[in-house]
Amino acid sequence: MDAYKKFTLQGKSKGLQRGSGGPREKGFYAAIGLSKSDYNALSNGIYDYYGNAVDEGWITQRQSETAYIKAQKKLLAGDYAKHSTDLHEMNFYQIETGDYSALIDSWKEVAEGVNPEDGTGFHWGPIKAGYRFTISKNQLSDSQIIFNRNNLGVSKISEIDSTGKLRGDSLEVRFSNKVSFAIGDALIADASTGPRNYTITFLPKGSRVNDWPSGINTAKEHIEIHTSNMSFSEVFERK
């Protein structure tokens, strides 16, 4: 904040790279514990400090680049938070960064649908598969797939071996691929894994999908998992 006042507000903007300043993901500011104005001030202060520090001869260009990246990572990790980052509702920014802790809770399956490929098309029906749905801080799974973020910072959807065979402490993975995210009123994670495509849709309170069956409580949060294999879909609701 001192750098923001000394450099940014004095028109001495000079740094390595400045963000676009465009709209952020749903929950971004809540996740890092800052208001939008405080985030912008800190981000600009970091940017301008390390740019001016080189010109002033305080540090070298290499030191500036290393310190700048470290400071930005701390900012995005919530290290400069001014209010609590303890979240209990769906947070798109956290999900994108591989932190599913705000989703840890009791969930129940409320809908299941499939296209039996008999000419009748897709339709919702009774819950038959009843896959076990689990969420931890670092992983989401419905016993068909695993959704997580690897050590390189890449979010992936991995298909679990259909036999459920174990390898070590985890289920054996058949196929795995990088996730593409789309953000709007819902957060959509999509990946082609081997011969199938999987889509996970995260829907906050007040959201619904138009073709859902009646009776789903839109006042609650939902996660829908869809696969291209017979268009199988399942909807889970936070209790």
Image: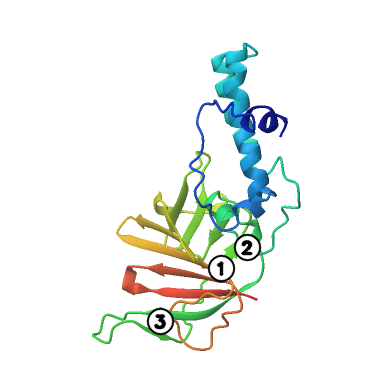
Q: Which residue is mark 3?
A: 211
Q: Secondary structure at mark 1?
A: loop
Residue type at numbered disc 3:
Asp
Q: Earlier in the sequence, mark 2 or mark 1?
A: 2
Q: Earlier in the sequence, mark 1 or mark 3?
A: 1
- Mark 1 or 3: in front is 3
Q: Residues within 10 Å of mark 3 (few under 14, many from 20)?
A: few
Q: Which residue is mark 1?
A: 133
Tell which of 13 and 101 is nearer to you: 13
Residue 63 versus residue 96 in the image, above or below: above
Tell which of 104 and 69 is nearer to you: 69
Distance from Cα at disc 1 to Cα at disc 3: 22 Å
Quadrant hosting residue 71: top right
Distance from Cα at disc 2 to Cα at disc 1: 12 Å
Quadrant hosting residue 51: top right
Residue, x 48% and y 42% (percent of image)?
20
Residue, x 71% and y 40% (percent of image)?
80
Residue type at numbered disc 1:
Phe
Mark on residue 70? none
Tell which of 135 and 83 is nearer to you: 83
Distance from Cα at disc 2 to Cα at disc 3: 24 Å
- Report the quarter where the C terminus lies: bottom right
Q: Secondary structure at mark 3?
A: loop
Measuring from the top left, give residue 25's x and y in whole percent.
Answer: 53, 54
- Mark 2 or 3: in front is 3
Q: Secondary structure at mark 2?
A: helix
Q: Is residue 167 visible?
A: no
Mark on residue 103? 2
Pick out the residue farthest to the top: 57
Q: Earlier in the sequence, mark 2 or mark 3?
A: 2
* Number of numbered discs visible in the structure rendering: 3
